[in-house]
Image (cartoon, rainbow, N blue to C red):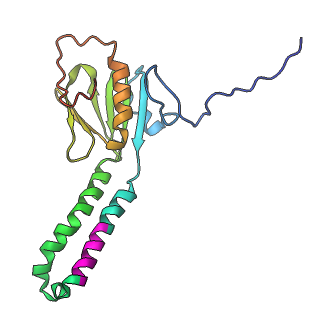
Amino acid sequence: MTLRLVVNQGPSQNGPRILAPGAPPSPGPLPNRLALHLEHGEVLAWWGEKTRMQVDLIALTGVATLVTLALVSAFAPTFWLQPVSAIAPPLLALVSPTLFVAFREWLGRSAILVTDGGVVHVSPQGSATRLPWPSLRTIRRDWLGGGVHLEGAHTSLRVPPVLVDRTRQALVSRLQDRLRGGIDIRDPMQWLS
């Protein structure tokens, strides 16, 4: 009989990992700045984070604005000879979609932690909002942020569009065997179905 060294071929320490059955893979180990928001003994099922703004969509709407301004300059060059007070409203109307997309991307920067006790939303500044499972009442579309809005009895939180699908999968994995008792969750989007 010979002894040989067996090298672990499993996931690396910094790679994606599945933390709970049925939950999607988390990006890696939970950073300490996010782990501070877990309660003692709380089990983490999944976590995800959006740290940067996606510049491609902002750039796309910005290019569309510039193309529109170029067409205005080509077909109505006298437009630019008007006083600033007359030019400002149409320019603001043209730039507003780009500003809205930039605001939506800025608003969506956050982290979501799905645990055995509920959902935790952590803002870029480090403040956390906790929504326990028993207090979940309504799930609806977030028209301002583009994702999903989870509302509880006394708290509400937003899930950014980039994290919506994996958050849903993690929530379903945590709620599938849980008895809901007398709690009725309004889910007009049928997001948890």
Q: Quadrant of the N terminus?
A: top right
**137 or 117, which lies in front?**
137
**128 or 102, which lies in front?**
102
Q: Does any portion of residue 116 appear in the rendered image?
A: no
| Residue lying farthest to the left in this orientation | 86
As for residue 141 lying within the magenta part, the answer is no
Magenta-drawn segment = 64-74
> How many marks overall?
0
* Residue positioned 34% across, 22% down in the render: 172
Q: Is residue 93 left or right of residue 55?
A: left
Q: Position of residue 100 (x, y in %)?
A: 24, 58
Q: Is residue 74 left or right of residue 51?
A: left
Up-down relation of residue 158 to residue 90 (above or below): above
Up-down relation of residue 22 to residue 112 (above or below): above
Q: Does any portion of residue 74 appear in the rendered image?
A: yes
Q: Position of residue 148 (x, y in %)?
A: 26, 37
Q: Position of residue 102 (x, y in %)?
A: 29, 58
Q: Position of residue 150 (x, y in %)?
A: 23, 32
The quarter of the displayed image where residue 71 is located: bottom left
Up-down relation of residue 55 to residue 43 (above or below): below
The quarter of the displayed image where residue 34 is located: top left
* Residue positioned 61% across, 30% down in the render: 11
As for residue 71 lying within the magenta part, the answer is yes
The rendered magenta stretch, by its main secondary structure, is classed as helix
The quarter of the displayed image where residue 134 is located: top left
Q: Quadrant of the C terminus?
A: top left
